[in-house]
Amino acid sequence: MIKLYSWNVNGIRAVLKKGEFQKFLKNYSPDIICLQETKAHKDQVEIDLPGYEEYWNSAEKKGYSGTAIFSKIKPISVEYGFPDKISEKYHLVDNEDRDSSTEGRVIAAEFDKFYVVTVYTPNAKDDLSRIPLRHDHWDPAFLDYCKLLQKKKPVLACGDLNVAHTPDDLARPKPNEGKKGYTTEEREGIDNFVKAGFVDTLRLFKKGNGYYTWWTHWGNARANNVGWRIDYWLASKSLKPKIKAAEIHPEQMGSDHCPVSVEVDL
């Protein structure tokens, strides 16, 4: 059984300083850890990870974005960012001329029987100015990339997708309709993954609402579980019978997001 965890740490240095990353390792002992929003380059972080291989994809802009994969199983290969042909096809530059392909948002690690892909999807922004980037460029590029990898091996894709997929995925769907993280365009991104045969692993085991992975800092939202589920593990359909558990871990503090996990019998 392989235990895979994904966590938007909202700054790896802050989580380490609080001692929460150390607690995370001790409490869960993941085989593979996927992080988003690391906000650091490897040489900026004092981290002791005996037994883990480390792979970092940091943004060119320091202190921003970034992803990482730490694995007890050595990957066959690791790819950082989208392949050139996908970046060129989908033109990942928005109307502010920000090139999201330089923001350290994707890592793919190839293992013997599967790929693990972690992603930190661009936020639509309060004024929805990045919706065109999301809908027309980023989301289709990420799906295309996962489908490309899937031609070779099944895919486990995880990360902060910055969208609540259905009304069950946020505590207050009606007041948030059409707002950042819950627009038709963003939700369509996950619809397209499902149409392509990918499985939302948590929903194999847990139905209904109350399962959230992110909470605002305002109004005691986390204590009252007024949250959003915007962090996911999506799996190729062929892996569905091998997925033995999928969980969220709101008890793990240190970030405004909590970790999400899957256990796969491979």
Image: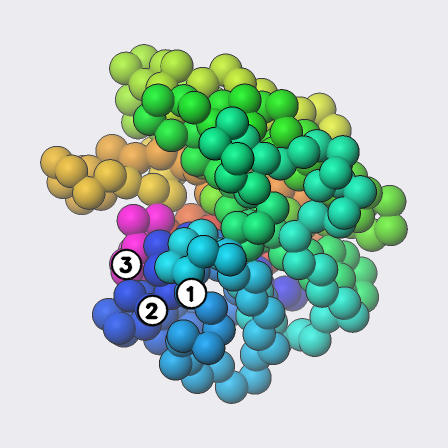
The x, y position of residue 135, in whole percent, is 58, 23
Label 3 SS: loop
* Mark number, residue 13: 2
Crowd rating for badge 3 (residues with CA inside 10 Å; few <14, some 14–19, many 20+): some
Crowd rating for badge 2 (residues with CA inside 10 Å; few <14, some 14–19, many 20+): some
Name the amino acid, label 3.
Met
The x, y position of residue 57, in whole percent, is 57, 61
Q: Give the side of residue 263 with respect to residue 39, left or right.
A: right
**Foreground label between 3 and 2:** 2
Residue contact between numbered discs 3 and 2, judged by CB atoms under 8 Å: no
Identify the magenta region.
250-257
Mark with earlier residue (2, 1): 2
Q: Which residue is mark 1?
A: 40
Name the amino acid, label 1.
Ala
Residue contact between numbered discs 3 and 1, judged by CB atoms under 8 Å: no
Q: Residue at x 61, y 77 (%)?
A: 53
**Foreground label between 3 and 1:** 1
Residue contact between numbered discs 2 and 1, judged by CB atoms under 8 Å: yes
Name the amino acid, label 2.
Arg
Q: Main secondary structure of the magenta part?
A: loop
207, 137: nearer the viewer: 137
Q: Residue at x 33, y 69 (%)?
A: 13
Label 1 SS: loop
Q: Which residue is mark 3?
A: 253
**Foreground label between 2 and 1:** 1
Asked if residue 48 is among those painted magenta in the image, a careful observer would answer no
The x, y position of residue 16, in whole percent, is 32, 72
The vertical placement of 40 against 130, above or below, is: below
